[in-house]
């Protein structure tokens, strides 16, 4: 392959960066790869778990960034396109309302030593926090992928 052919091949493919806020651990890497690799036009998928970044090398004439985001969001991964050169500062982002509600209820349940019935707020914290896990588990089941969210669903039923 000559230099001109390499340039044509590299110009054909576009490298896109996606912020995937629903990427919490390395067990979801298989889910993302299973979602994106079968799509027409996707050549390569790289996932960086600590920064919650997915890098996709794709043919922009066949598949758009919007379609890739849509595929990720169908699995409830809260994805969006990162503008090139746009550094995202995660320190300025708030956690999900479910995480905030769960944390507040859990903290209030520690007041059970002052007023005994407040211990039931810990159960309410679990009820609030399980909803996003349940949705991600359903999405993983839909995609025939075993991950920690499905295991949490099964553990809750035992």
Image: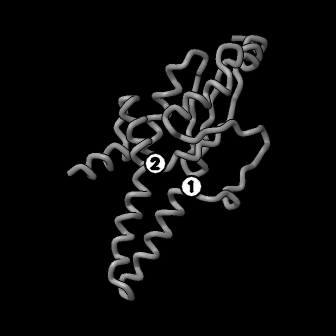
SS label for mark 1: loop
* Mark 2 surroundings: few (<14), some (14-19) or many (≥20) residues within 10 A: some
Q: Image quadrant for the N terminus? A: top right
Front residue of this view, candidates 9 and 64: 64
Quarter occupied by residue 39? top right
The answer to whether the residue labelled 2 contacts the one labelled 1, judged by CB atoms less than 8 Å apart, is yes
Taking the spot 48% from the left edge, 67% from the top edge, the residue there is: 103
Residue appearing at x 46%, y 63% in the figure: 102
Q: Position of residue 75 (x, y in %)?
A: 49, 34
Q: Position of residue 123 (x, y in %)?
A: 34, 65
Residue 122 picture location, percent across and down: 37, 69
* Residue at which label 1 appears: 96
Q: Give above or below for 30 relative to 134.
A: above
Q: Which residue is mark 2?
A: 132
Q: Nearer the viewer, residue 112 or 117?
A: 117
Element type where label 2 sits in the image: helix
| View extreme (left): residue | 158
The part of the image, by quadrant, that contains residue 93 is bottom right
Is 111 situated left or right of 51 in this image? left
């Amino acid at each position: 392959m000559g230099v001109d052919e390499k340039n044509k091949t590299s110009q054909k493919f576009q490298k896109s960066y996606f912020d995937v806020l629903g990427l919490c651990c390395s067990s979801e890497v298989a889910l993302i790869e299973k979602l994106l690799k079968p799509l027409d036009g996707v050549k390569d998928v790289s996932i960086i778990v600590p920064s919650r970044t997915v890098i996709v090398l794709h043919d922009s004439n066949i598949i758009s960034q919007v379609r890739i985001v849509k595929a990720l969001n169908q699995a409830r991964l809260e994805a969006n396109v990162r503008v090139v050169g746009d550094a995202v500062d995660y320190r300025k982002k708030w956690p999900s309302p479910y995480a905030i509600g769960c944390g507040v209820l859990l903290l209030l349940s520690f007041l059970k030593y002052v007023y005994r019935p407040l211990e039931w707020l810990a159960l309410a914290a679990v009820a609030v926090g399980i909803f996003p896990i349940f949705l991600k588990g359903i999405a993983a089941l839909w995609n025939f992928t075993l991950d920690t969210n499905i295991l949490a669903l099964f553990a809750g039923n035992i």
